[in-house]
Amino acid sequence: MASYVGQQYIGISTAKSLRKQNMSSTQTYSEYFCNTALQSLQQMIVLSEEAEKNGFTLSEEQQKEYEDALETMKTTAEKAGLSVDRYLRRMYGQGVNRVLYEKMLYRLTLASAYQEKITNNFEYTQKDLEDYYKENTKSFDRLTLRYQKFAIVEATETAAGVTAEEAKKQAEAFMSKVKDDASFSAAALKLAKENASDPDKVTTENTLKTDTTYATIKNANEALADWALDASRKEGDLALIDGGEKVGYYVAYMITPAHREEYNTVDMRHILVSLSSTDAKDETKKAEAKEKAEKLLKEWKDGAATEESFAELADKNSDDKTAGGLYEKIYHDAMVEEVNDWLFNPKRKAGDCEIVYSEKYGYHIIYYVGENVPYWQVRVESTMRNNDYNDFYEKASENYPVTTSKFGIWYRNEPF
């Protein structure tokens, strides 16, 4: 985990046992990793057993993915100059060999495929989506506002504090300067400079919260969130909010009140001619990639020039390996900026096909399929599917009681 996210963010020492390092006040890192592994293992067993019990089998494509993963593992072992068993022991620890690895990988592939099947099998009517949204508007509505906190600070032996009365006066003085969004920002920047040890280095302020949610604001303060999501809220509302005992006060300004995201998502098909960050700096390789993209686009235009022919071309040539190059229900900022801007251009129409270059990935040949359902509906449906799947899994897992023994793990080398 330290190598994955960066040891400086985890605080794990590889020099001593994880049983002697606390992740939190109630759990050691050893307990955390063991429990996470057990949960993952249980989920894999439950889903794969349920799949077999219900006669579910892998599709040809899923079976090929499993076989390709095995082949990749064998090729990697060969390149490392190791037998498969020795490679697996080095990667996963004592006791792991080819037979066990193949069995576990198959179970994992089957479990993942069955989970996808169960999740996608739930069906919802438009009324179901509308009703769920109405019952949970705070979970889905988005809003844009600014807020500045004026905190109560307890005095110490070396520093003066800020009383509730003083915090309120500070907030009122700030509020008197706010007439609109721009004046709020200017007042916030001035305040940030006054409180900074080096004012010259302060060039921006962080009061703006764009397309935020009730849950996010509630993390800052519940009273603030309740004000922001009040049904009577309107653009330009300005308020002084009592954050509660020992908290302080907030000055809040509403820019865009809470609303449902009604804009339509879009579908596209996509062929990627990828460029690594290194190759993107090489003009020759960049030119070669562009030439390849242009040839593929010309090949499509000279042929049937249909969505179906584009899908066939994507299967044969795209570096991202998505079936038919199809991406559905794309929402704002889901894609890299250059692709996002092309997709959501107001002039975009079904059947448009162009090459778009992005610094991050290379050349994108994009076929615009058209608009899909509103984004709020995508979010609601996703939440409902997750909830229904969790209900299914909770019930199914009751048939697979778990007993654990840490006997084996005690004999592993440190840090375990």
Image: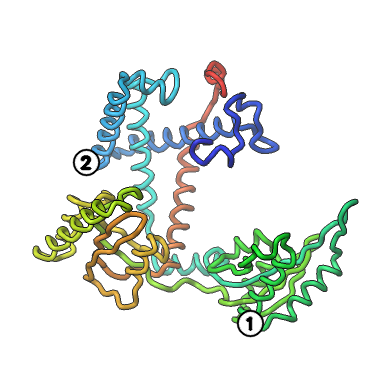
Residue named by callout 1: 180
Residue at the left extreme, as displayed: 303
Residue at the top extreme, as displayed: 411
Q: Which mark is residue 45?
A: none
Q: Residue at x 57, y 27 (%)?
A: 14
Q: Residue at x 70, y 72 (%)?
A: 190
Q: Residue at x 15, y 65 (%)?
A: 306
Q: Which quadrant of the rendered structure holds the C terminus?
A: top right
159 relative to 101 in the view: left or right: right
Which comes before the other along the chain, label 1 or label 2? 2
| Label 1: how many Cα within 10 Å (few below 14, some 14–19, many 20+) | some
> Residue 272: x and y, percent?
26, 55
Q: What amino acid is labelled 2 in the image? A: Glu
Secondary element at tag 2: helix
Q: Which mark is residue 60?
A: 2
Residue at the right extreme, as displayed: 157
